[in-house]
Image: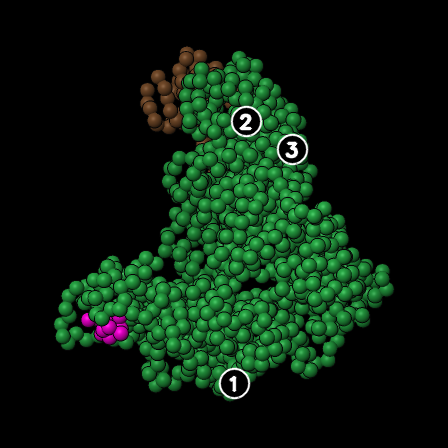
Chain colours: A green, B brown
Amino acid sequence: MATHLHLHGPFSHLDGASSAADLAARAASLGQQALALTDHNSLSGIGEFTQACTQAGVRPIIGAEVTVEDATGASSHLTLLVPDQTGYSHLSQLISAAHLSRPRGQPMASQEALAAHAPYLIGLSGCRQGEVSRHLLGGRRELAEEAARRLMGWFGRGKFFLEQEVCRLPGDRPLQRAMRDLGQHLRLPRVATSNAHYAQAQDFWLHDLLVCIRTNSRVDDLAPGRPMNDWQFVQSEADMARGLPDDPAAVAMTDRVADMCGLALPDARLLFPAVLLPQGASSAYVYLRQLTEQGAIWRYGQIGSRLRQRIDEELSVIAQTKFTDYMLAVAEIAGWARGAGIRTSGRGSAADSVVAYCLGLTDVDAFARDLPFARFLSLGRTDPPDVDLDFDADRREEVAAHVARRYGQDHVAAVATYVRLEGRLAIREVGKALGLPAAELGAIAKRVPYYVGADGLREALVRVPELRQLKLSTGRIETLLQAAERLADWPRHLGTHLGGLVVTACPVAEVMPLQMAAKGTVVGQFDKRDCETFGLIKIDLLHLRTLSAVNEAITVSQVPWETIPADDPATFRRLRRAETVGAFQLESPAQRALHRRMKGDQLEDVIAATALIRPGPIKGDMVAPFVRRRLGKEAIIYPAPGLEDVLGRTYGVVVYQEQVLEIAVRVAGFSPAEADRLRRTMSRARSKAEMQSLGDVFCARAVARGVDRGAAAEIWQTLLGYASYGFAEGHAAAFGLIGYRTLYLLEHHSAVWYAALLNHQPMGYYPPQTLVTEARRRGIQVRLPDVNRSEPTWTVQDGALSCGLLQVRNMNAEETDRVLAGRPYRTAWDLAEKSRLQPAALRQLVLAGALDSLIPNRRRALWQVGGQAAVADLADFTPERRLAQEMVALGLAVSAHPLSCFRPRLERAGVLRTDQVLCAPHRMQATVAGALVRPHRPPTRSGERVVFLCLEDERGLLDVTVPEAVYRQNADAIFGPDAWLVVVEGTVREVGTGASLDAQRVTALTAYLGRSYALQPPRA
Amino acid sequence: MDRGRERAVQVCCDESGDPATFVMGQVTYGPLRIEDTWAYREPWWQADGGGNRQVYRVRSKAGHLFDLCKMPAGDWRISRLFD
């Protein structure tokens, strides 16, 4: 039937135009028994490919087209196939050597590397870029023979084949004849390939388009490397034979080569390194028990019988699932970080483990909260547990370096993540290749919501109001949309996972190919999912900027972070007022609206709130019942009898993932592992049919246990509502605790906390401009930078929040040091002379107001730093101009809010301030002006496209809801490329103790005032 | 002879679909030996961009080389001629 042994898939990055599923289906439809994947210098696609082949009933063969050094040092291609597990390991090492020995993006394996690994592989001489073919095409028969002999020597007779390409290209026939003659001369077998880049001929256009993107050319251009015809597809045996009439044996040979290749995938399940044990510890298990018991004494003072039983159960499961070394490894990492003074905090499902708590991996007492360990790990689960460790963002790399030192550089690699083609990227890249005007593409891309996938563009152009208003050129837009639909989620290029590190007992390159990431670190070619599939254990060392800010704030304020009182009345009053901007996880408009209604007065409320504002509980309509029941306005009812202890803490409402698990166990008799699989499937299931099938299983098992069919269906509906996404309780508790403590800092050390937040941007929900406005609203003086007083970063001076010199455009650390060293300065000349700053930096300091204390008139200051005396009566810039320049120099407005420039005019027009609206009566008609902050269109239960945004002015924030009809009419004012200052007319709606505005019209301030202004939006 | 100009031509094919003879003017050329063959895809992004041109480089009995081109519509042309 013929087998395709040279095939490129999506992970050939812009050189493969069909999905693994389409390729496998094509081979199956032709009756082909096997199919090989040979991406360019990569094994990234083998997970998807193997799965797709298995589903299609085709035997997958693993391989790669590797760039190797030829006899002259130039690069050439070889098609390599894996015969067995050992071969896989050698191919992985060869690809790693090709990447790591050369500059990033130019992989090439040396002849020595090839010679070392070739004996374990099957080699095909390659495409026209192969050394043998290239010499034959150039008429250099002797060099071709010499190359073939050399390669045959390395691979071994019987394992090296001359590749007969059947691509209908000019020169094919003479090349095929020459290859046949060479093979006969050397007694080397030939094997046919079509060097396939797509499944069927009709997919050719997509491949051509991808090549245009890759080569940065347009379809109208003649560009080298573009395919000439549409024959590089998965051809039938008959097509192959017709294209190779002079060497028919080569087609038959494909099946014989395929038979030499067994399925060989990485199997790293047992490859996590054994932890070095201290003297006296007879085994890892004994050592883990010892550490856990020590930790239990530290955490609880003593170990009671219930606690001991829980610890024993957890340790037993950890040992049986063979994760003892893993737990010891993460405990060692967290311990090392703490010893080095690096702030760390664990989250995720690890917070459901008492052992993790005792080891200091998390700060959530899973025993006191009675959290089910099964959410973290259970017998029968095949996926590895997740211990997510957050570290101070400024020092996370130190932790990663420690791991590399401890286990050896060769044994540690970052996990990959693939940047995929989503809506905006597809518009820009495909549109450019199609030759569409850059301005038109920019206008579309800027208006495409971030969540729209490449396959959702067609619908978005019809449904998203600001896109519908665009006048688009027809014709090629349709081609663009067709291409985008086909290329949705296509891997564009390799990136680095935020924190995932793979650690292996053997060198990582033996199980996963390595390459260099853009940031100069070594990254593996498997993403998180593939690592899980192949049993590679990932350690998540994440960075959390909040921890960096915490570190700074508690150092300055001397607040003991770990012993911040959990019942501080002032902090809870702030929570109930919803004045939480700047508090971790508690500051979003949805959180603030919740707290206004919920009236929280204990840490448990903060934890529940953290979990409630998630897609699962929101879509499941669980927020409102939770609040009503908490306030005693609605009776607490449970979905089934016997669930009181599962749902009691959340008033009968499903808020946490653990509750889903527990309900599945209690109602339908699932085992913990089955329940967790159910949870995972629920969170990933896309189709209604899949969910229905899950529901049928749940209900059938519940009924079998005596639950009434109607009740079982009702309980399933409750769980279904939760399906999209929610938090584990342990995770919510970890985040809730940090959130509460940051709120405490916000309440009691606000200036210090704002300074810390501003020094660690970007982070949090709001931009720096909002933080500055909030600080000022709370009565904190916010000062411009001052060359005589400011520190490099934001600091608190005499109770005032003082802008740092590094905030000023063109100022770097070295120049800032020079400013500090030359103090004090008496005049602008003095500064220019002593600091020796570049003119651009001096100019920006003036415009930022950093010389106001020396010379208040900034126009005169500009003359002076330029070394010239200004004319005596030179007038300063207007206030609006000064603020505009300040915003350019600092990236945000520090001395005043931008709206203040327009306030007199707005007041005359009856436009209110945000604080006036907040205390206005319900349903009052109001007009208010402000800067747009984070307008967004989240998915709503009703499916309606509602816009939520914040309006920010001198007095604070006002939450605004824009209904779909209003959004459609005013889309460009909200989401247009220049959207910033707006005037909103609407109706006041009371929300708990505050208010929001339901918009009826949103107008750009320029249109409202009938004039333009010099101000530009903040940079950040 | 002309170079670089395409000219319509009558071609007779064998059972496999390969050109066996062709007639140009009053002369029949053949039997033909196929030296090479390749395909060229019409620009797919253009309105009339469907299909392949199949080019056959053939040698006549007299030893002359020709490029015979089968157009997407099925008609034949000589796209390049060699002395």
Splitting the image into 4 quarters, where does residue A940 fall?
bottom right
Q: Image height check: is A47 above or below A605? A: above
Q: Are marks 1 and 3 in contact (CB under 8 Å)?
A: no
Chain of the residue displaying label 1: A
Q: Amino acid at mark 1?
A: Arg
Residue A23, horizontal then vertical, whole percent: 60, 39
Residue A850 visible within the image: no
Q: CA distance from mark 1 to mark 3?
A: 71 Å
Q: Chain of mark 2?
A: A
As helix, strand or loop, the secondary structure at mark 3 comes to helix
Residue A468 or A177: which is nearer the viewer? Answer: A177
For marks 1 and 3, the one nearer the N-term is 3
Q: Which residue is mark 1?
A: A923
Q: Which residue is mark 2?
A: A116
Q: Residue at x 55, y 78 (%)?
A: A571
Query: Amino acid under label 3?
Result: Gln
- Chain for numbered disc 3: A
- For residue A332, the mark is none
Q: Which residue is mark 3?
A: A85
Asked whether A265 falls inside the magenta stretch, the response is no
Do dots 2 and 3 share one subunit?
Answer: yes
